[in-house]
Amino acid sequence: MTAPVRTEDPQGARDPRQTRGSQELIRAEEPVLAHNYHPLPVVVARAEGTWVEDVEGRRYLDMLAGYSALNFGHRHPALIEAAHKQLDRLTLTSRAFHNDRLAEFAERLAALTGMDMVLPMNTGAEAVESGVKVARKWAYDVKGVPADRATIVVAADNFHGRTTTIVSFSTDETARAGFGPFTPGFRVVPYNDLAAMEEAVDETTAAVLIEPIQGEAGVIIPDAGYLAGVRELTHRKGCLFIADEIQSGLGRTGRTLAVEHEPVVPDVLLLGKALGGGIVPVSAVVGRREVLGVLHPGEHGSTFGGNPLAAAVGTAVVELLETGEFQRRAAELGEILRDGLAGLVGKGVVGFRSRGLWAGVDIDPALGTGREISERLMRQGVLAKDTHGSTIRLAPPLTITAEELTGAVGALEKALG
């Protein structure tokens, strides 16, 4: 695996707080940070491309890419340049005023996704919350569902975020327990089960909201025809199809969108993570005009949504995707990843699922939990993360090389030995 060139502070000096070692910094976090994460014991201080460096100068190959937020790697030159230029001009106006970057961002994102309108937000969870609101408003204003009766059908084992509304339709008890009462209006059906979905959809259904590939669940890929079946069902029953592409979209699976692996066009797309280029939080609800057009001034908003800095970085991200280079890389390198993982089946790997540069790898529980395998990988200079039980996720930056990818698979083999 090729390591990055180390870049020192141009002034030759560092903030004294950055001279503390990893263990000291980890201990310093304990009393002051709420325990909402259980990170691996590595303290990242610098990054470039597919590599990160900790405070002691150890280098690691990033095989997680910020859960797809870093699809273009750390500090991609084109994205950093766009951010620097915008920082020198204008960062925030709020949507109380127009800014000179937002229209281009919206136009190009709509064109990239084949949609008509864009609702800019910040985080993925905000995009999901906004999609829920839009679907309900559409149900009342367009479909004619009686007031406060709208329902949304979702899939079991989903991950759409952790806000109060979103955990209301989660089946993950870790995310739910202790956070009730829960928001009504959701029906949960098994993923990849069209018959169950057919039974759940009725005249009150505003939308079906699913991930084209379930990421947090372990990169669960539905059967061929499932997404097309969802599209046909929602057309026939007169409700919306909302695809949460926050993790699966923007090049990750070898296509711009994961739904493109079937001839499917949803009514609404939820985008985030990679849309911010690993620099700023950027998300968006993208959809047909007759859907997003139900919103009127004052009914929804965000102080930072669509800010000039976010729009400038988002436009640069769209420019990268317009070339098709990253989609091609994910498809081609995804074959190397798939072949490498196939060679580990029976050697500690009991199964895996992959599409493009995204894989869920099931480890023999006798060899350790997903957390323990991730820690072994970390000691070999590779960063990955577990999901549930003995499953780990691999989602490297789309800028990774074949050599680096092969090295990561080799490191996994050693971790299983």
Image: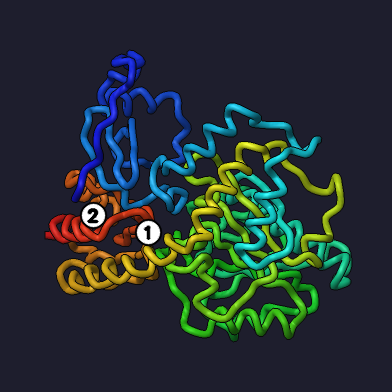
Alpha carbon separation for disc pair 2 and 1: 26 Å
State whether residue 172 appears in this view. no
Asked if 252 appears above or below 18 in the picture, the reply is below
Q: Residue at x 37, y 53 (%)?
A: 397
Outermost residue on the left side: it is: 417
Please identify the quarter of the rendering in which residue 118 is found.
bottom right
Q: Is residue 364 above or below residue 24?
A: below
Please name the residue shown 71% across and 59% down the image.
132
Count neighbours of disc 1 (C-alpha within 10 A) and say few if under 14, some if 14 to 19, many if 20 or more. some
- For the residue pair 58 and 3, the one nearer the viewer reads as 3
Residue under pointer 1: 388
Residue 156 image position (x, y, % from top left): 54, 68
The residue carrying mark 2 is: 404
Tell me which amino acid carries mark 1. Answer: His
Residue 31, image x, y percentages: 41, 24
Q: Residue at x 75, y 79 (%)?
A: 202
Give the x, y percent position of residue 402.
Answer: 25, 60
Residue 28 vs residue 137: left or right?
Answer: left
Comparing labels 2 and 1, the label whose residue is closer to the camera: 2
Horizontally, residue 256 falls left or right of residue 415, namely right
Q: Earlier in the sequence, mark 2 or mark 1?
A: 1
Q: Amino acid at mark 2?
A: Glu
Q: Secondary structure at mark 2?
A: helix
**Residue 25's mark?**
none
Q: Nearer the viewer, residue 277 or 385?
A: 277
Tell me the element at label 1. loop
> For residue 414, what is the image quadrant?
bottom left
Characterize the local packing of mark 2: few (<14), some (14-19) or many (20 or more) Cα atoms within 10 angstroms: some
* Residue 270 in sight from this viewpoint: yes
Estimate the x, y position of residue 257 in percent, counting from the top left: 53, 67
Q: Is residue 299 above or below residue 417?
A: above
Quadrant of the rendering where the C terminus is positioned: bottom left
